[in-house]
Image (cartoon, rainbow, N blue to C red):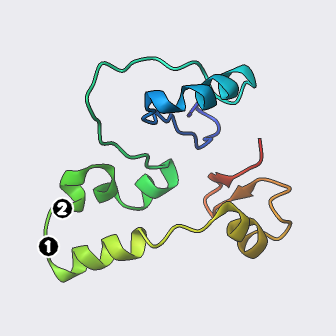
Amino acid sequence: KNNGKTYRSCAHVMPQAWSGQNHIIANEVQEGIIEPTAGTDSVSKFSWFVPAFTALSNLKLLSHYGMTASTDRENRRLMANTFLRPKTWKYFCETVTLDNCTTPYYDDKGLLIAARP
């Protein structure tokens, strides 16, 4: 979200749920963990979330056209270095931040990278 002053990374998720999971979904809705389900009127969808700090670092990462623009070694190296194996939140908090994620973590340009709700 960009209100002109600050950027806060967020994502909207539309997971696929099968009817055999209805009791789990109902419990999570009742506990306020998730919003009630709704049909999307689609068979399947492929999408990804790119935070602003990633997009600003390289515009090629904003679309699959940019990511597959060429198959040369340089582009493959860029993709491999960008999309390393993801680290867990626990790893990030214990290893990268100085205070175990008790305060917000910003990159060197002042963009928010991680914060507890």
| 85 left or right of 69 in image | right
Looking at the image, residue 111 lies above or below residue 74 = above
Looking at the image, residue 85 lies above or below residue 89 = below
| 99 left or right of 23 in image | right
Residue that badge 1 annotates: 71
Dividing the image into 4 quarters, which one contains the N terminus?
top right
Point out the residue furthest to the bottom here. Answer: 73
Q: Position of residue 100 (x, y in %)?
A: 83, 65
Residue that badge 2 annotates: 68
Looking at the image, residue 113 lies above or below residue 99 = above
CA distance for labels 1 and 2: 7 Å
Give the image quarter of residue 9: top right
Q: Position of residue 90 (x, y in %)?
A: 72, 65
Q: Residue at x 24, y 60 (%)?
A: 67
Element type at mark 2: loop
**How would you rate the neighbour count of disc 2 (Cα within 10 Å): few for under 14, some for 14-19, many for 20 or more?**
some
**How would you rate the neighbour count of disc 1 (Cα within 10 Å): few for under 14, some for 14-19, many for 20 or more?**
few
Q: Residue at x 23, y 52 (%)?
A: 64
Q: Residue at x 39, y 18 (%)?
A: 39
Q: Looking at the image, do the residues carrying marks 1 and 2 touch, with CB atoms under 8 Å apart?
A: yes
Element type at mark 1: loop
Q: The residue under label 2 is which amino acid type? A: Thr
| 46 left or right of 71 in image | right
